[in-house]
Image (cartoon, grey):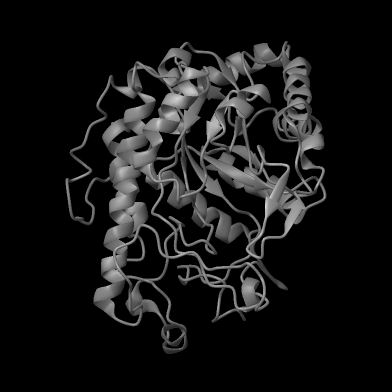
Amino acid sequence: MTRREFLRLAGATFATAAAPAVDLRGQSIDGPDPRRARPPRARLDTRFGDLRRHFIFEYYPWYGTNPYRHWEEGGHVPPIDLASNYMPKLGAYDSKATTAIEQHARWILDSGAGAINVSWWGRDSREDSVVPVLMDVMAAHGIQVTFHLEPYSERHAFNYASDVEYLIRQYGDRRRWDCMLMLEGADGSIGPVFKSFRTILPARQTDCHGVVSDINDYAGDADWRQQTDRVRETFRRDFDRVTLLADSSNMDRTRASGFDGIAIYDNYVRPDSWRQLADGASSRDLVFSFNVNPGFDGVIRRDAPPDSCYRPLPFEPPSGSYDWFRDVERERAAAASAARVADSFHSTVALQTDASLANVRHGFFLVYVTSFNEWFEGHQFEPMKGADELTAAERAIGYHNPADGSYRLTLLKALLASVLE
C-alpha cells in the first residue's frame, strides 16, 4: 500500500473522530458572551469534517527540572522564582514527564482543540528527544501533532527541506501515521502542514547604538525557494498537498520563497491590523493564519548587560499600568487578556471565512492558539495557580496570577464550542 493510499484510509478515521463533549458553563467576561457568538460566514463544520484539528495549540517541550531548563532563564532561580510572570498549576515541571504530558493532553482535549504544533529545535535537540513520548500520549487522547521549525542554527534555512523530510519519515512513516497531523482541505484533500520561524529576514540590522551588522541566519528568497521546491518534489506522489507557512508579513518575499502562505506568531501584531495583511496575502494568492492569543506578558530578564539593546516589552493588550500585588489589578489585567482572546478568535474566524479572500478560494482554514505553554512570554493557556493557591513565598515574587487560574482555557473552550457544535 502506498503512503497516499494508507493516508486516504487513515484520513477517513481522522475526519470522523468524534469531537469531545463541551461544557459551556464558563466564567462571564466583559463584552458580548462568546458562547452566543457565531462565525459570520457559512458554518465551518459543513466544510471541514475534522474541524477541531484546524485549531492547533503552539506547544513547547523544552522545560526541564534536573537540571532546570527554561524555568531559570533571565536570571531566575527555580522552583519558587520562575522565568514567568505566572506560577503554573503544575509548578515547574519537566517536559519529559509522562504525568505532565498526560495532564496537558486532558486539558487540550477538554478545550475542544484537536492538535498541537510542537516547537522543534533540530534532530539532536532535547526537544526532539521528547517527541516520541509526547506523541504516544497525544495519540492516546486523539490529539494530532505537527511541527514549528525553529531557528536552531545559523544554517537552519539550508536544512529546511531535509528537516521536513526527517519529520515526515520519523514521526509519520515510522509511527504509521498514528497521530501526525494531516490537515484536510474543504475539497477533501489531505497533507501535512509545517510552520517556520525567522524565515523571511532582512540581510542586515541596525541596533539601538546605530551599529549595522549582518544577520547571521539570513537566507535569500532563491535559497528558500530551492528548499520549498525540494520538499514538494520529494513528496509530490505522497500527499495531495504539503502546506508550508512562514511567520512573515512580507508577502512578496513569502511568495518568491515558495511558501503557501503566512502564519503570524507575534501577539503584538494586533487583530485590527489583520485585515490589511489578509488582503495583501490574498492579492498574491497566499493563504493566511492569524492566531488566537491573550496578548503578551513577558518576564523581565535580570541578566541583560546594562549596555545591551534589550528593552522589556510592556503588557499587551494595554489597559494602563498594573500594581501586580493588588488583587483588583490582577483581575483587571486578566479581563484585558480575556478581551484579546475573544477579539482575536472572532477576527481570525471572520477573515478566514471571508469569501473574497484566499483562504476560502483554497479551501484552507487553520487557527493557531498562541500558546499552550510558552510561560516566559506570558501568553499560555495552560492553567496557572489561582491567586489563593500561591504560597507565601510565591506571592512575594509578585506573580500575576488572577483568582481563576483557568480563565483563558475556560473562555477558549466556550469560543471553540461556538463553531464546533
Q: Nearer the viewer, residue 347 or 146?
A: 347
Give the position of the C terminus as an image quadrant. top left
How far across and down, in percent of the image, does residue 259 sit?
63, 25
- Residue 93: tell me if it is visible: yes
Q: Nearer the viewer, residue 373 or 292?
A: 292
Give the position of the N terminus as an image quadrant. top right
Give the number of callouts.
0
Side of 137 relative to 399 (left or right):
right
Side of 295 relative to 192 (left or right):
left
How far across and down, in percent of the image, does residue 280 sit?
47, 26
For residue 281, above or below residue 125: above
- Residue 192: tell me if it is visible: no
For residue 113, above or below residue 239: below
Q: Residue at x 34, y 41 (%)?
A: 272
Q: Residue at x 29, y 46 (%)?
A: 342
How far across and down, in percent of the image, does residue 166 sit?
78, 33
Q: Residue at x 78, y 23 (%)?
A: 226
Q: Which of the 4 image quadrants contains residue 27?
A: bottom left
